[in-house]
Amino acid sequence: MGTELIFISIILVASILQSSTGLGFSIMATPFLLMLFLPQEAIQINIILSLIISISLILKIRKDIDFKLVKRFTLGSIVGVPFGVLIFINININALKLGVSILLLLLTLLLICNFKVKSTKLRDFTVGGLSGVLTTSIGMPGPPLLLYFTGTDTEKGKLRATTLAFYLFIYFISLITQIIITGTNKIIWESSFYSIPIVFLGLFIGQIIFKWLSQRTFRIFTYILLICTGVYLFLESLSLL
């Protein structure tokens, strides 16, 4: 019962973050799902639920989507996905978490210090590629996008809509790739199915929160989210290496 309550709490909070920020589900859910499931199971549950969330929200926010940016992210991710699969199969996942956590914390520090980056086509492709790598390796495409959008001072509505549109592609491709390469099991699909009502409750709450978030509050919230994720991944990777 305790494990089920923890699982429900993770899904609810992550869904609220996804709906209110466009980026929170994988960043919040994946590290904690790894405490309850095997890596393959945690990653596939995250991908399935994230795909459901993106499909549920995309029609409501389609007017804010930057389709040119989504195209560049998508093209970049096509290159990154195979590398993510190779990493998942051949490299110690905990070592990867350690590297990601350190990079995440360093880049977040730069953003807090008001470091800015200008959006270019090459950087768009690169960010998409990194997201593709992280999606198929650890199920977390969000950090590169969140860092990039924050550094380019992207408006919160455009950030959320563009990210969710990109997620429709990257999560679908990653799920198919994961199933083909590593297989799937009953636990993954049962856990995902039973989570759907919790996900929709979280989406409803998150939509309300989004309307009340100012751009400044949104920025502060993303910093907190990035730092917490980086610290958690860092501590978790050290304890398991």
Image: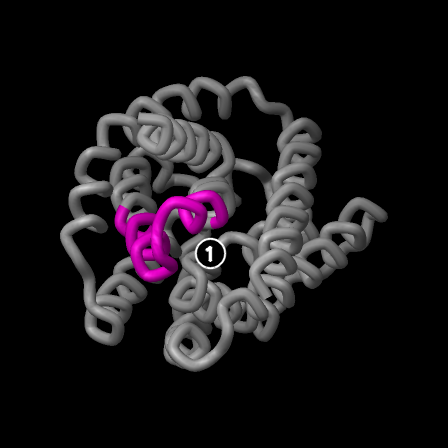
Q: Is 162 drawn above or below residue 139 in the view shown?
A: above
Q: Is 60 drawn above or below residue 238 in the view shown?
A: above
Magenta part of the chain: 31-48
Q: Position of residue 80 (x, y in %)?
A: 44, 75
Residue 65 visible at all: no
Q: Position of residue 19 (x, y in %)?
A: 42, 32
Residue at 48% in and 78% down: 91
Neighbour tally class for label 1: few under 14, some 14-19, many 20 plus, Cα within 10 Å: many
Residue at 41% in and 24% down: 207
Q: Is residue 170 left or right of residue 210?
A: left
Q: Position of residue 239 (x, y in %)?
A: 61, 56
Q: Is 80 drawn above or below residue 103 in the view shown?
A: below
Q: Does the stretch in magenta take in 44?
A: yes
Residue 121 visible at all: yes
Residue at 77% in and 55% down: 116
Q: Specify the quadrant that holds the N terminus.
A: top left
Under mark 1, the amino acid is Met
Q: Is residue 181 left or right of residue 147?
A: left
Q: Specify the quadrant that holds the C terminus.
A: bottom right
According to the image, label 1 marks what residue?
Answer: 140
